[in-house]
Structure formats: structure tokens, C-alpha cells
Amino acid sequence: MSIAEKLPSILIANRGEIACRVIRTAQRLGLRTIAVYSEADAEALFVQMADEAYPIGPAPARESYLDADKILAVAKQAGAACIHPGYGFLSENADFAEACAAAGIVFVGPPASAIRAMGLKDAAKALVEKANVPVVPGYHGAEQGADFLRGEARRIGYPVLIKAVAGGGGKGMRRVERPEDFDEALASAQREGQNAFGDARVLVEKYVLSPRHVEIQVFGDSHGNVVHLYERDCSLQRRHQKVIEEAPAPGMTAEVRAAMGRAATEAARAVGYVGAGTVEFIADGREGLQADRFYFMEMNTRLQVEHPVTEAITGLDLVGLQLKVAAGEPLGFAQQDVRATGHAVEARLYAEDPEKGFLPSTGKLWALQFPEGEGIRIDTGVEAGDTVTPFYDPMIAKVIAHGATRDEALDRLGEALGETLVAGPRTNLAFLKALTEAQGFRDGPFDTGFIERNLSALGAEPQPLDAAAVAAAALQLEEERQLAGLTLASERADGEHRSPWLDADAFSLMPRPPLGLPLNVDGERIEARIEWHEDGAIVSLPGHDIGEGEHEVALAEAEPGAYFALHRGRQTAVSLFDPFGVDLDAAAGSGGVVKAPMHGKLIALFVSVGDAVVKGQRLAIVEAMKMEHVLTAPRDGTVSEVAGVPGSQVAEGAKVVVLGE
Ligand code: MV4
């Protein structure tokens, strides 16, 4: 019996690229696909792709993609045989998995008991330790008093890491170097754990130095088979957000792979695992990967964002395998049948601004274009014209490259990124391209601190004006201005209302004088000077070197007279200067205004009006997306204004503290 005979229809309880990804395989296998969507996603690609689609509520995830009851009601109404949760949202919600089963709908994922067993860090560690899986030395017990835990930290030896028991993704995690810093770090980790997960309990571990994140993809079926599909290296992260993932891991040996693969499948067996899962290890990377220097971190009981690199090297369709296993069939292959070919890398293209501390960026995608090429795969859930909203993860696409060697894969990835065009929101495109070329990443070994140590070399700091981009846009705008017959104030100095240079006859008779074209460049007024010569025009910008352009500038029109000039992965917004259209706030620069990085809650304020502060001093803490963001002074100064009191909500970009001289 085929998969589609056992599971004729599937509801995808997710959105964006992963919903598209699941739909593609489900349709290939002949399943009827059912999408659910929030008000923000009515026009989204995944809704268009699905055979059927049902609205499930307002944009905030809590009222739509996280509303288990609503999704189950739709599943019953539409007659869905199974539900694929994707990643995030309800994917690791044991209650939801159970509710599906109770409704007679197959949950495409592990049994609820396995999700629960791996959900709590301390319990999961104790459990896998019994199955002979190595765990980091530490205290994972119930006693939570500060004095006791400080004693445990001393016993374990500094540096230590305090982690919220219910944590994940770095939330509620504090590295402590010295005993005297222990209490403050403990209080902060407990507070974050309480706020984010409603659980203030922590565990204390030895801090693994030069940590590398290596994870093993595992698969189980309902017949007791468990295999692993090699490893992925996800060490290239920033603040626990993966940036580039790859398979296999650089420096992996057959011996370490066998040991890690065995540990991962043992961990999976220990909880009766069925379906796709990932066992995360942390490896001490100081002397290369070693069979006795990796430790179980956690198990993710879902399909992961980075699964395409595993698909690229193994040639397997992991969603197809999930459906096969969900239909009750055996995997159909054994460990020794799993082969890997070549090397694969994945880069996550995000709507965020590396030049502004990776702040999420939103807005309409005026242009979006991806290349095709040998070994290139693009997984995306958006198209030109869509809007990146603040409601969901701002990932625009995953760019995946496969090659015979790591170098070839990285070359292909870099080339693909170079041919990718995005206009509208700021993106990390240039940053990703720089990473593919970074010597330290190319040569290895690199650990999870690589990005943070190389921010400047990777261009993740304010960059000077892209004069080549502005020049290209200036010429385009000037050409359009001539075609439209618009005159500039400077051309009207003599009282004429029509420039003689817009008149074809006059143009042919006289040499054309240089022109000063007033522009709005990313909210700043800049005058471009255009000079005409026999073989074309030359643009110069006062105080800026345009340089020889070996890289093409692509122009994406936003509205008449306004362009995004795309150049080397960066964008510059250029329009004819309109004094009433300028964002004065942006043009003035932030100076001493310290703003909330995201929508959130002000949970601590350390200064009041009149306080003298020094650059880098902590001013306030904003809690957003369940994480604490410390706001620091951008320079020395005196506090001239404090907006808000602890406990109050702050909007993204709202000023929190203002510094005077
Ligand atoms: C650690 C560690 C060092 N020692 N545990 C970060 C997220 C969470 N999954 C576990 N993490 C870490 N746990 C010990 N005992 C360093 C990290 C860590 C890290 C781990 C994986 C990937 C990126 C990381 C970045 C910083 C810290």
C-alpha cells in the first residue's frame, strides 16, 4: 500500500518556507494538501500552493498558528488524515501530539512521550546518561538554593554555564567566569527562565571551551529501527541563531562519527523515538573533534530548518521519510545503506540589518530574485511583492549549495548569494557572502564564537555610503527626469520654466553644462554632480570615491522616482530629493537617543535624569521575544530624558533613554 493510500491528506500546521517544503513532497507523493493561514498570510505562497486553505485567525501566532484547538477543528472539518507541524509553533508540543491522536489524526512526528522526555533539559540529560551517552559534567538536580548552586559551581570548576532547565536557544543561559559573578548571573538566568518558560529552575555545567555545535540527524520507525543520517555542523551562529550550516562537519573522522552516531541513536532509542529528530552535541573544539570530547546537549524532536544539507549529501527526502514512517511503514534501509556524497552548505537569508546590530527589518519585498545553478537549491516561502512582517521569523530564504568538496560547495554558495537580489527590507546578504569568503571559516577550525570575533571584517558595522550604487541610481533618475520633462529649481534660476537641456534641438547645439542633482539617499540629502562627455555621463559625489565598478549595480524601482540600488548584497534607497519626504529622525542619526531594539517590556532601568554615564554603561533592560536585551550608552554623556518606567511596554524603535553632552 502506498503512503497516499494510508494517509490520503495532510494538514500543514505551519507557514512560510517550511509549509512550502512539506507541500512539495506531499504533492509528489499524491497527498491532498491542506493549508491553514493567519490574516497576515492570506496571499502567501504556501496558501497558493496547497490544494485547500483555511483561515485560522489574526496575525499573532498565539491566535492562529499556536491555537491547537482551532487547527484541530479545521483538520477534522477538512478530513485531514495527518498533520505536519513543521518546525517551531506546535512542533514540539506533546499535548498537541496527544490531541491529534485522540482525534484520530496522525501527528507527523514522534510519540508525545518522546517529546516530553526530551523537553526538560535536566531530565533528558539524566535519561540519556543512563543509556551511556556522554553529558557535560555538572549539577542537574532539584536543589536550587543560591548557596548550594554556588558550591556546585566551585566543585565543577570555573568557567561554568548556568542554564534554565526549560531553556533552549540560549535563553536563560549565563556564562560565569568567576565566583564573585555567580549570584548576579544566577538571578538573571532564573528571571529569564521564569519569564520565558514559567520555570525558574536552572542547572550548572562546566563550560566547554571553543565549543562546536555538531548535531546528528536521526530517524526511527515504528518497527524499532533507528538510524542516523550523518552529522551537521552548526557552529557558525550569532547569538544562538544559526547562520550557515553544513554537512559533513569539517574535521570529522570515521571514528568520531561512529561514536557520535552511536550516542545519538542510543539517545533516540532511550525515549522510543519514531520519526525525524536531531541530537545536538557540544564538542570541545580546541584540538579537533575527538571521540571522547563531545557531550549530549539536547534532542530536538522535529524536522529542523537545516535538514536540506542532510538531504543534499544523502540524496534522501526527509519529509518523504517522515510521511513513510507516519504511515506505519518501516524505514526500508539500514545504517550501512546510508551513503554521503560531497559537501553541502546552507545559508539563512534574513531580513535583518548586520550594520545595525542585526536588527530585524520589515517591509515590502520590492524585488526578490534567486539564481538557478548546478548544486543550488533555494527554499523560500515568499515572492516579490510580499511583505516581511514583525509577526513571524524574518527568514526570507535558505540558499543551499552542494558540491564535490567543501570548497566547491562554498564557492557555489558564494556565487549564488552574489546573484541573489533583494530590495526593500535590509538583509544579511552581504554578510553571508563575506562569510563564504572569510579565511577563518574557509580554513577552519572555527567555533561558535567565530562570528562575534570577526564582526568588523564581515562588514557587520555601519558602512560608508555606497557611492557606486548612488551614482547608478542618479543616472537613472536623471534620465527619467529628462523624459518626464521635470525641471530642477537650479535650472529655473533665469526665470525659464523649462530647461533648455531638455529640448532636443538645444541639446544638439550646445555642450551640456554639469548638473547638481539633489538626492535623498537612505534619508539623507546628497547632491550628485553629473558631467556629460562625448561618450556618456560621469557622476561624482562630494566627498565620496566612486571607484572602479567591477560589480554590477541592479536597480529595483519602488515607486516612480525612487530606487533601491542593489550592489554587492547591500541596498541603498535613492530618490529625487523631496524635502517633505525625508525621515528627519533617520537623517539626524540616533546621536544620544537609545531606542528599544524590538517591541517589548522595559524590565529594568538603571539611570535617571541628570546621571552621568560612560560609553558602554548599562542603561536599561528590555525584554522582547522572551529574551533580555541590555541597552548600553552609545557614548559618554548625561541622561537628559528617561521614557517609561519598569514594567511598561515599549514599541520597536521607541526612545528609552536620551543622553545630552
Ligand atoms: C554550552 C556551552 C559550553 N559549555 N554548555 C548554547 C545553546 C544551548 N543549546 C547550549 N549552548 C551552549 N552550551 C556548556 N556546558 C556553550 C554553548 C554555546 C553554544 C552551543 C551551541 C551552539 C552555539 C553556542 C554558542 C554559544 C554557547
Image (spheres, helix red, strand yellow):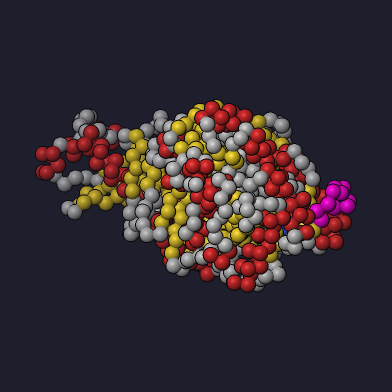
Q: Is residue 25 left or right of residue 111?
A: left
* Whole-percent x, y for residue 257 in the image: 61, 67
Please give the range of residues in magenta. Answer: 139-149
Q: Nearer the viewer, residue 280 or 449?
A: 280
- Is residue 48 a member of the stretch shown in magenta? no
> If the image is split into quadrants, where does the C terminus sit?
top right
Q: Is residue 291 above or below residue 188?
A: below
Q: Is residue 550 above or below residue 64?
A: below
Q: Is residue 66 above or below residue 513?
A: above
Residue drawn at point x = 28 percent, y = 35 percent: 488
Residue drawn at point x = 21 percent, y = 36 percent: 483
- Is residue 143 a member of the stretch shown in magenta? yes
Q: Nearer the viewer, residue 387 or 49?
A: 49
Residue 172 seen from this side: no
* Whole-percent x, y for residue 429 in the image: 46, 51
Residue 502 seen from this side: yes
- In the rendered image, which quarter is residue 485 located in? top left
Q: Regarding ligand 1, which quadrant of the image does it lie in?
A: bottom right
Residue drawn at point x = 46 percent, y = 55 percent: 400
User: Exactly how many numbered labels are in the figure?
Assistant: 0
